[in-house]
Amino acid sequence: MKKYIPFILLLIITACSKPEPQKAAVIGIEDIASLTSNYPDKIQVINFWATWCKPCVDELPAFEKLKATYGDQIEVILISLDDVENLESKVNPFLEKHNIQSQVRLLDYPYAAEYIPMVDPHWDGAIPVTLIKYKKEHKFYNQSFEFKELDFEVAALLEK
């Protein structure tokens, strides 16, 4: 039994060192304007989603895997379109349950017609949508993603 104690302790330490899930930070339209107008030297993958949107929820693991795969080479920002009143009752519990590690923002701005064109003029308002930005590149995707597709898009930008 004594020979298993170091192994058990290692398992306990590993389990305890799991990173805490993110909590959503509330943002406004000025933050959307800043995010969509600036072109960083690091790839930004910005996904618009909501806890009530099944295709959105289904694709979140792909974004988490993308962040885990590329680490500091990319920035993954998940922008929730849930109602701000649901931040503590639905959004943050959802993030904890799914152990979301990417940055999460909750947009507190009710006028979609004002922020949608800032993201992309082709956005019809449906979610999920994703914006991938890098230097002067601006790619907009009005679709759900699987990891392979996201990985392909990021890898292609990193080769430039």
Image (spheres, rainbow, N blue to C red):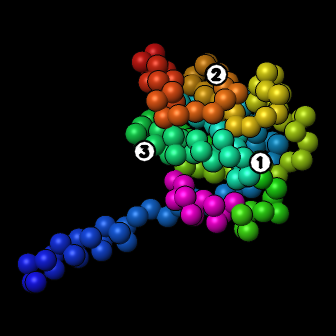
Residue toward you, 29 or 84: 84
Residue, disc 1: 81
Measured Cα–Cα span from mark 3 to mark 2: 21 Å
Crowd rating for badge 2 (residues with CA inside 10 Å; few <14, some 14–19, many 20+): few
Q: Is residue 25 above or below residue 57?
A: below
Residue toward you, 80 or 157: 80
- Residue type at mark 1 is Leu
The range drawn in magenta is: 91-101
Residue, disc 3: 68
Could you tell me which residue is drawn at 58 percent across and 41 percent down? Answer: 59
Could you tell me which residue is drawn at 23 percent across and 71 percent down? Answer: 10
Q: Earlier in the sequence, mark 3 or mark 1?
A: 3
- Residue type at mark 3 is Ala
For the stretch drawn in magenta, what is the main secondary structure?
helix
**Residue 139's disc number:** 2
Image quarter of the N terminus: bottom left
